[in-house]
Amino acid sequence: MQVLRAKLGLTGTKNGCDKGECGACTVLLDGKAALSCSMLTIEAEGKKIITIEGLADPITGKLHPLQEAFIKYDGTQCGYCAPGMILAAKALLDKVPSPTVADVKEALAGNLCRCGAYPKIITSVLEAARMR
């Protein structure tokens, strides 16, 4: 995570607990949600890493449906957990395009929201699934 933030300037990846317990540092590693604070840089060598900065269309700048849904349905309160939540949700939607509430809860279980915006987060993920 330190390399992403300090060396690459990808500050959307947050440092919450630095122990792999909060999910704020979630990135996609070869399409799967991974806690970047629990990884050595060498472990990511040769793998495709996507941070929150990589979700929007690089040409048009159009936000990913998850990002749009989090905005539209107030899926974030303070915003600190949002990048990790969105990336964990993307990993879910790539695997399960039409998830149930239980699927969403299970996929996001490793991501903590200190504001308690879970109902809006779940709604945002379900609506993003419908938008796709």
Image (tube, helix red, strand yellow):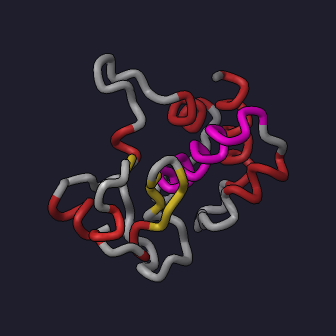
Residue at the (39%, 30%) spot, across then down? 56
| Total count of labels | 0
Q: Quadrant of the N terminus?
A: bottom left
| Most common SS among magenta residues | helix
For residue 113, side relative to residue 20 (left or right): right
Q: Nearer the viewer, residue 129 or 82?
A: 129
Instruction: Determine the residue located farthest toward the top in the rendered image.
Output: 60
Instruction: Determine the residue located farthest toward the bottom in the rendered image.
Output: 19
Q: Quadrant of residue 70?
A: top right
For residue 6, side relative to residue 58 (left or right): left
Residue at the (54%, 34%) spot, across then down? 71
Residue at the (50%, 77%) spot, across then down? 20
- Residue 48 shows up from this direction: yes
User: Does 69 sit above or below residue 1?
Assistant: above
Residue 80: x, y in percent?
46, 58
Q: Quadrant of residue 45?
A: bottom left
User: Does residue 65 belong to the magenta stretch?
Assistant: no
User: Does 37 sit above or below residue 116?
Assistant: below
Instruction: Determine the residue located farthest toward the left in the rendered image.
Output: 7
Residue 105: x, y in percent?
76, 56
Residue at the (34%, 42%) spot, across then down? 53
Looking at the rendering, the stretch of residues picked out in magenta corresponds to 82-98
User: Does residue 95 belong to the magenta stretch?
Assistant: yes
